[in-house]
Image (spheres, grey):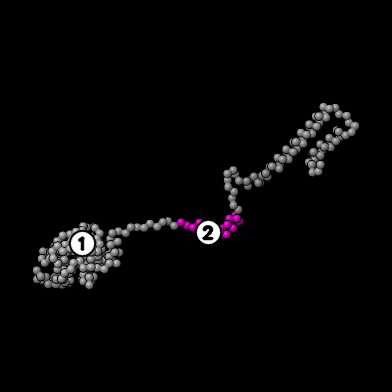
Amino acid sequence: MPNLPRRIVILLAYGKLLFRPGWIMPKPIYTATGLLFVAMLLMVSVISSIQQAVVPPEDVHNMPLMGEPKSTPAKESVLITQTHPELKAEPVKPPSVETVPSTAVTAARIAAKESPRWPVKGKIINEFGWQEHAVYHDWRYHAGIDILADKGRLVQAIYSGEVEDVFTDKDYGLTVIVKSGQYTIYYGSLSTVGVSQGSSISAGENIGTVGSAVAEPQTHLHLGVKKQDKFIDPRSLLN
């Protein structure tokens, strides 16, 4: 039998000596010897199988633990990255948060795109600048224009904007101030008011009705326009 372990070869040699012709062996000795021979063969076979199944110590350290995923070799990772560049993770940008503009900012943007309108139709009875006062008969600086109109006539907003104040002026009577973009507009000498402080209004919306003032008894609308803290002639917007 070729390629047999040395121990098995020796056992076979002894077996031939025991069973060579001329030997007379009692039956019990024959049986015992045969059983011993078979047992030895089985032990040798089992030991060989165990030695083949044993993993060398250096391989045991490289074996993954139970449930642990096998790691990808470094060369394979590089190859994947080069072949599929789209697999690279891109940084996620945080969603942009839109801020809601305030009422004043919204009104300013609207006013910048609007065409101004006359607040009330009528004859201008008092111009902007230095004028001789009809009641006091002296020269005074008039910070607006006076538009003649019937009492109770509706007064419309020149621009969209936000109502900054509603008050009674000693010279111009009941007055509404509206912030419209870069302009601050004064609607004076009113009889009634249809808006309140802090409210938003649209161009053409009713501000109030025409009235009069103590210093200017004729029913009219006093219209003043301030740009960057300086009064300007309202005609420069309306013409």
Position of residue 102 measured from the top left corner of the image (x, y, whole percent):
30, 58
Position of residue 193 measured from the top left corner of the image (x, y, whole percent):
17, 59
Kindly state the secondary structure of the residue where label 2 is placed: helix
Position of residue 131 measured from the top left corner of the image (x, y, whole percent):
14, 72
Q: Of the residues under marks 2 and 1, which one precedes in the sequence?
A: 2
Q: What amino acid type is highlighted by mark number 2?
A: Glu
Structural crowding at the residue carrying mark 1, measured as other residues with C-alpha within 10 Å and reported as few (<14), some (14–19) or many (≥20): some
Q: Which residues are magenta?
A: 74-92
* 88 in magenta: yes
Left or right of 16 in this view: 129: left
Q: What amino acid type is highlighted by mark number 1?
A: Asn
Location of residue 1 by image quarter: top right
Left or right of 70 in this view: 166: left
Q: Can you say which quadrant of the picture contains the C terminus?
A: bottom left
Return the residue at label 2: 86
Location of residue 169 by image quarter: bottom left
Q: Residue at x 24, y 68 (%)?
A: 116
* 34 in magenta: no
